[in-house]
Image (cartoon, grey):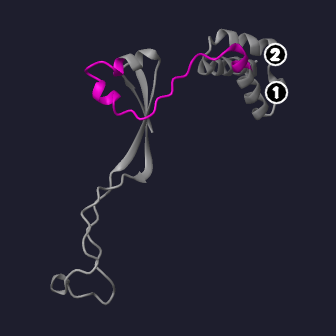
Amino acid sequence: MRIVAFAGALLLVVACKKPIAEPREPERSENPPMHNVAPRDPEGPVPEAQTPRPVRGRAVLAGDQRLNERLRSPDLLPLGSRIRRRLQVEAASRDELCACLDHVLDAAGNPALMTIELRVTLAEHALGNYRIMMNMADERLRRESIR
């Protein structure tokens, strides 16, 4: 996995373990004529030379509305037309951010780690962005753990 800056966005490239399906050749007869068949080896057929199969890669582009605008530009239109799925995430409400923070603290096993007032303050200062809220909460907890 690697992260690359691209067109003002972050590009996360992940290689998948499944190989790309190779293009099928025209179907051949199951039973070729006998004059084309080499004598069989008693230990089994000789394996054909195997070429490495290409690895399928997946890329995740993360950015704001400017990324979609850039992908519509004439220079990047070929790339933009190849993107299969797009998920546009809008800014989260304060209540959604608070619910997320409550869930994370419950999953961590200590829901009383932050006061309700601190959770609301973090959600308001995050401006609808989950990543910003989680980073601020992490910084706050890290500072408190040092004390």
Q: Which one is in front, 129 or 27?
A: 27
* Three-letter code, disc 2: Ile
Quadrant in which residue 23 is drawn: bottom left
Q: Going 34% across and 34% down the picture, which residue do you hit? A: 82
Quadrant in which residue 108 is drawn: top right
Quadrant in which residue 37 is drawn: bottom left
In x, y percent, where is residue 3? Answer: 43, 31
Residue farthest along the left direction in this orientation: 35
Check the picture and name the quadrant holding the C terminus.
top right
Asked if residue 54 is positioned above or below residue 122 in the image, the reply reads: below
In x, y percent, where is residue 135? Answer: 62, 20
Give the residue at mark 1: 111
Check the picture and name the quadrant holding the N terminus.
top left
In x, y percent, where is residue 133? Answer: 65, 18
Category of crowding for the residue at label 1, using alpha-carbon neighbours closer than 10 angstroms: few (below 14), some (14–19), many (at least 20) = some
Residue farthest along the bottom direction in this orientation: 42
Q: In this view, does 143 lie to the left or right of 128?
A: right
Q: Which one is in front, 108 or 69?
A: 69
Category of crowding for the residue at label 2, using alpha-carbon neighbours closer than 10 angstroms: few (below 14), some (14–19), many (at least 20) = few
- Range drawn in magenta: 70-98
* Three-letter code, disc 1: Pro
Residue farthest along the right direction in this orientation: 112
Asked if residue 89 is positioned above or below residue 29 in the image, the reply reads: above
Mark 1 touches mark 2? (CB < 8 Å): no
| Secondary structure, magenta segment, majority class | loop
- The local secondary structure at tag 1 comes to helix
- The local secondary structure at tag 2 comes to helix
Kindly identify which numbered label has been placed on residue 116: 2
Q: Going 81% across and 15% down the picture, which residue do you hit? A: 116
Alpha-carbon distance for marks 1 and 2?
10 Å
* Earlier residue among tags 1 and 2: 1
Q: Going 62% across and 11% down the picture, which residue do you hit? A: 127
